[in-house]
Amino acid sequence: MTASAAPNAPSNMAAAAFPPNWPKRFAWAALTIYAVYAISVLDIDFERIVRGMDNARRLFARMFPPNLQADKLALIRDGMIESIQIAILATFVGVALSMPIGLAAARNLSPVGLAWAARGLIAILRSFHPVIVAILFVKAVGFGVLAGILALVVSTIGFVSKLFAEVVEEISAKQVEAVRATGAGFGHVLMFGVFPQVMARFVGLAVYQLDSNLRNSTMVGIVGGGGIGAPLFTAYQRFDYDVVLTILLIIIGIIMLMEVVSSRVRQIFQ
């Protein structure tokens, strides 16, 4: 009897090991139905896609070859240098402010009231796209790099402080308690119990945010925040699509260079 029951054991175990997940199936079905509904009400159809592909083909045809005239390259160079400066300054200030805000938002280090207040501030800072924030600062301080820097500082604080708080909450409590057991104050607990566990990831967040700010500096420049965005938008308005392509290629090159630099920086701090 034992021998006859043995062959049935694997099939019963397999059936129990992979039960149907009905909530997940219902969720995927609901998502699919909603996607079909959204497409039907948003005027998305195949004919418009075909027309868009033809328009894109004609646009790309007008972009080539890129414009390499000396006066255009000088203008693009000045705009790119300004964008890089905006990104570096915004990242430096934003990351410096993100560390105390992130520590205040970490619930394993801060009192409950302070942690929730810091998380509320982070939620407010993350509620708006950098372009919207840049428009507000352009109205407040006028056109130029200051508006772009302030907008990207707000974006940096919202992103880095949130992730930094989550990183701090994931640290091992044993090392923190060991430092506290020596009678060390809060500053020494941070210095010897918290920072050694999180600094590598914090540097990675900072480098990633620098890369993101370099891209976002183009968008805030379009609305008056300085940088390469202004020449890019002007070229679009004048239908100088060859200049547009030149700017886009330079932006791509800078981003790829930043990717290499950020990878080297992460290796140094690992």
Image (cartoon, helix red, strand yellow):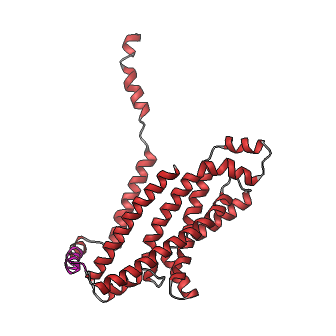
Residue positioned 51% across, 88% down in the render: 143
Q: Does 8 appear in magenta? A: no
Residue positioned 72% across, 41% down in the render: 178
- Kindly indicate the quadrant of the structure image that contains residue 55: bottom left
Residue 142 versus residue 269: which sits nearer the camera? Answer: 269
- Kindly indicate the quadrant of the structure image that contains residue 5: top left
Residue 79 versus residue 169: which sits nearer the camera? Answer: 79
- Kindly indicate the quadrant of the structure image that contains residue 154: bottom right
Residue positioned 26% across, 71% down in the render: 45
Q: Position of residue 36 (x, y in %)?
A: 34, 64
Magenta stretch secondary structure, dominant: helix
Residue stretch rendered in magenta on the structure: 52-66
The quarter of the image holding the N terminus is top left
Q: Is residue 164 visible?
A: yes
Relative to 41, is 240 above or below?
below
Residue lying farthest to the right in this orientation? 183
Relative to 8, is 134 above or below?
below
Q: Is residue 219 visible?
A: no
